[in-house]
Structures are given as C-alpha cells and as structure tokens.
Amino acid sequence: MKKLIPLILSGALLLGTAACGGGTSTTPEGSTPPAEGGSEASDVKIGILIPGSPTDGGFSQQGAEAGKKLEENYGYEVATVEAGTADVIKSEAETMAAEGYKIVFGHGGQCSAPFAEICEDYPDTWFVTFGGTEIRDNLFPVCMCAEEGTYVLGVAAGMMTQTDNIAFTLGGDYPAYTKTTMGFALGAKSVNPDLKIQEAVLSSPDSNECYETTMNQIKSGADFILSNSNEGQAGAMKAVGESENVYTFGCLGNFFDMAPGKVLGNIIGDYNVGYDEATKAIMEGTAEAEIMYLTIANGCVSVEWNSDIPLPEDVQAAVDQAYEDIKSGKIDVPNEYEQDAAKEQLASYN
C-alpha cells in the first residue's frame, strides 16, 4: 500500500486486495445511485476526455475502451471526446457538466488543473482524473502506478544493455508522465548504476518527432528505449524496428506487433478496473475526495513479457524478484506525488 501523503483530504486510503477501491463520503447533491441497468441507468451520462486518438493502441485507446465497458456493464450513456489542450479540456468538461453529466473523466494528469477551475461550479457532477494533483469536494485523481511496471522494465534494460546507454522519450513534462520514465531510470540504475540515460521531452506526442528523437538517441549509443508518449510511441517503435541490436518496451498497451522481435515487454495498466471502481464508488455514494491508487499489489498494473524473445535466465530471475518486491512493498517506487524523492534517489547513483 502506498503511504498516505498530504494531498489526501479526508479519511484513510482504502485499497482492496482484489480490486482498486475507495472509502466513504457524501456525494454531490442529487446523486442517488441509479440501478446498474434498465431505463434509470440509461439516463446516466458519463464523459471521457482522452488526449489523443481512440485507436492509438495505447493510453488513449485504453480510456476509450474503458468507456465502452461502462456502457456494456451498466447501460450508462458514455461519450468519449478527444481533448488535447487545457483550453479544450476545460471547454468540453464544462459543456458536459452543464448538460447534466454525472461523471466527467479526464484521461491524464493534464486534465487536473482545467477540472479544478470549473468543478465547484457544477456540484452535481463528479470530475475524476487519471493522474493529476487537484482534489476538491467533487474532484479526485486516480493514480495508475505504471511507474512500478517501468521500474521492472528498467531492471531488464540495465542488465541487458551492451552499450551501458539507454534512453527514453516523454510526451509531456509533468509528474503523471515523468514518474514512468523516472521509474524506468531507477530500475536500470539499481542494477547498473554507472550507465548513461538519455532523456527527451517531446514538444507534442507526435510520432514523427518521436521517431526523429529516438533515432538521434540510438545514434548516440542507446540500445534500450522506452517511450511514454501516447500516439508518439509509434515513432519510437518504428525507429527501433529500423535499427540493429536495439530493443524497446511497450508502455500501457500491447505493442509486440508494432516492432516484431524488438519489444521485450509491455506495461499493462488495467484502466477498466480503475474506471469501474471509480464509477461504482460514485454511484453507490462511497466516493471520497482523495487519491485512488491502482498498483501491482491490487492487480491493476502488470508486466507482460514477449514469449518470442526469452530473457536470459539471470535477467528473468531479477525482474521476477523486482516485481515481487514491489508487490510486497519491499521496493517502494516513487509515484507522481513523490518525484522530488525520486530525483534524490536517482542522484544518489551519480
């Protein structure tokens, strides 16, 4: 269980062992939970704002698919809209709230500040962000701890690099993004403290820019690559696929087919569970204005290895041990609210 931090406003953080859950509090006025189906449920409207294409094969697509699951499971009306900038996020969320949407989800920490600007004007709507720091009476973040998975990938990269040079690219420079590559760097440094790590933040999650950036990193000696850049990740996969003796990992999706023979493993975040648990808590009146964590320990984050590219025996043993140590709490990978500690930890290796 992640330790409590000052951002939590009320009560103790409760996490189930089989799923990711919350505690109890009062809901916004007029929020009697509807039945999970039938005409009453069909009157419930839920909005999901995603930062990129719903078919990007990664982060945005997982948000869109989670919305479809809510429709299938409960009969709610779910609208998914692309919103890539703060102005669009604010505008779309405000429109949904004004139209009586029960929940507006922001799929990414970039939604946190725009939601905070408007949520108090719409007390009958819950605003939920995947990532972010803002908390209000009707706004809370869900923290997908993908950094736990990227730490495990970093262990593999740190042990397998032949050049002692690895690299990553990011689609944005804020904690919900940087925590994943920080986790990757910490995992790599834990087994190979002297290796070089190249880092780059893209001006936008664009596949062409990511391709060029990754190619430059490869030309500078990097032989293991991680990209967390939404649709930009396709550019990193293309660059790795065109380069000899270079390997990569998939971030928040299944990318094995995007660069055949080059993708050693994927980080999988079960956003379906996160959306389901947040929605149920709100509809049942048990949602709290506090952070909801989704972790390896509660089954929401996992690592999928490529069976076509077996890891060396010692590497497999090391990544398995790291995974179990994170699950048990022996290894505490800093989350997005603990990035100062993560930077200190990384600096200790230099």
Image (tube, rainbow, N blue to C red):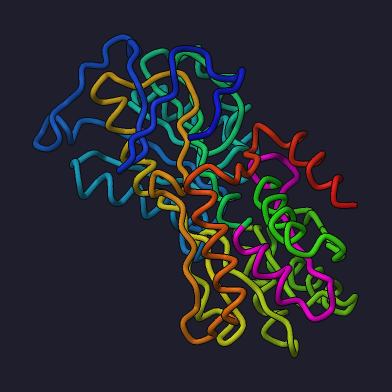
Q: What span is in magenta? A: 152-177
Q: Is residue 6 left or right of residue 36?
A: right
Q: Is residue 168 magenta?
A: yes
Q: Is residue 130 magenta?
A: no
User: Residue at the spot x=88%, y=79% of the render?
Assistant: 219
User: Residue at the spot x=64%, y=66% of the render?
Assistant: 233
Query: Would you identify the image quadrant in which residue 74 lies?
Result: top left
Residue 34, percent from left and from top: 17, 25
Q: Is residue 259 left or right of residue 191?
A: left
Most foreground residue, 254 or 346: 346
Give the residue at the far left of this rendering.
Answer: 38
Number of labels in the image equals: 0
User: Residue at the spot x=24%, y=46% of the render?
Assistant: 71
Whether residue 159 is situated above or below residue 29 in the rendered picture: below
Residue 153, percent from left and from top: 62, 64
Whether residue 14 is situated above or below residue 328 in the rendered picture: above
Whether residue 56 is situated above or below residue 143 in the rendered picture: below
User: Residue at the spot x=30%, y=20% of the render?
Assistant: 286
Most foreground residue, 327 or 271: 327
Most foreground residue, 144 or 183: 183
Whether residue 78 is situated above or below residue 233 in the rendered picture: above
